[in-house]
Amino acid sequence: MPRRVDLGQVVKSYDVRGRVPDELGPAEVSALARAFAEQVDVLVDARAALVVGRDMRTSSPVLSAAVIAGVNAAGVDVVDIGLASTDLVYYASGHLDLPAVMVTASHNPAGWNGLKLCRQGARPVGGDSGLGQVRARAEELLSGARQSAALAGPGRIAHRDLLADYGAYLRRLAPVSGRRLRVVVDAANAMAGHTVPAVLGPLAIDLVPLYFELDGTFPHHAADPLDPINLVDLQAAVRQHRADVGLAFDGDADRCFVVDERGEPVSGSAITALIAARALAGEPGGRVVHNLICSRAVPEVVRAHGGIPVRTRVGHSVIKAEMARTGAVVGGEHSGHFYFRDFWYADSGMLAALHVLAAVAEGERPLSELLVGLLAGSAHYVASGELNGRVPDPRSVLAAVRAHYEQVAGVSIDDLDGLTVSHPSWWFNLRASHTEPLLRLNVEGLDADTMASARDDVAAVVRNAQEAGTRADRR
């Protein structure tokens, strides 16, 4: 009797991630890669081919070799680009018109690793676009329930260095010219240490590098700039060097976070608005996709610059699909993902960084003043940031919160992604995690007091719902 294999713990909504080797090892990775190679349309010149890249984690060389072995076992050739950021893999997928696998766990701790998959042209593969089928086939391969012969004998391996071409392509999309800038970059010992010199090195800027040495143990701090504690060194360096801009990247460098000349963090929503305004200057009437967690300032800036805002659910595969459907020129998420039509609708932290540098270099105002001017027509919104709470039954709590706010005058409610409750002076979104018994809460208000009041109110409703559920369970 073949053993039953369950990859449910590592195959997430948008990618594959798990602890190595307890949850994810060479066997699992090889099976997933083979399953992906069998299912995507990869025929090129009557033979199949697929791009493979990897980050600097200590387990990535072994897992990358397992990916290549799995792909070759399906009779598919591999274009191995070696060390890469995720957006470099997207570039390879788009430039070569091939599907791709990136070995990375992004911002997760050192003991984790995973896979990001895309079809030709960097088209996403997620839970609603093929990842479930890949998981099911990989489980068959691991259990021995149904094997298949290679498509055309064992695949071959070709090694290719696309780093310089990638850097040149990005600089053509967002040229930086004007006054000379001093820029601090915190690579967190991760993949930006590999790609920043190739992208920013040729620019006429004074680059101050922090933690560019590739080290998958993350000796200085975690490669997760969404956590404010991981921006402290960058903020101090910006102030020390009197820099114009500070940039921080996550582990696979597909996300970019920005610090202004004062050392103050700039929200992902503000950067989305800045990039949108630049894009709309060249394409009046264009569409800009933003997820529903972005500040209200984003659609306000888009409309003020003659564009059409398109609101979506959270998640990179959702954003990419909606951009492709609507032909949007750019897209953005509060979490530091920025997407570009000219980059195959994929996200690139490095391209976002170039747009920020270009915007600052073109004028004489510092970044903080540039953003004040950009957002002048919007209210001074204050956001809570994402607050996570563990609850035993997220669905029942969401239902109770909805029932409560249906009785509140002056609000509107929608279910695009979780529960969004909107009032003229505040809004909040409460949604369940796809992978854990967590509720994620984001709140925004016209000022700090309004935001805090709305945040505390919904938190109290959540607590009451939990307590009611606990009392019901005891009966």
Image (tube, rainbow, N blue to C red):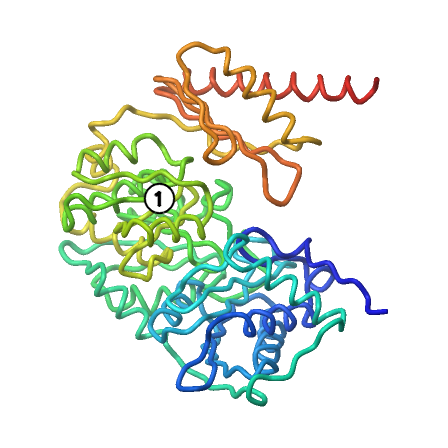
Direction right: furthest residue: 1
Residue at x 16%, y 49% (from the top left corner): 283
Q: Position of residue 97 (x, y in %)?
A: 37, 73
| Three-letter code for the amino acid on which mark 1 is drawn | Val
Residue toward you, 126 or 291: 126
Q: Where residue 21 sits in the image (x, y, percent)? A: 71, 64
**6 versus 313 height, above or below:** below
Rendering coords of residue 393 (x, y %): 68, 31
Q: Quadrant of residue 423?
A: top left
| Residue closer to the observer: 147 or 431 | 147
Q: Which residue position is annotated with label 1?
A: 259
Decide: few, some or many residues near mark 1? Use Cα within 10 Å; few <14, some 14-19, many ≥20.
many
Which residue is found at the position 50% from the left and 21% from the top?
455
Q: Where is residue 4 in the image (x, y as percent from the top left)?
A: 79, 62
Residue closest to the eye, 41 or 63: 41
Going by the image, does 121 lie left or right of 397? left
220, above or below 34, in the image: above
Q: For the point 25% across and 51% down, which residue is it?
A: 329
Secondary structure type for disc 1: strand
Q: Nearer the viewer, residue 325 or 473?
A: 325
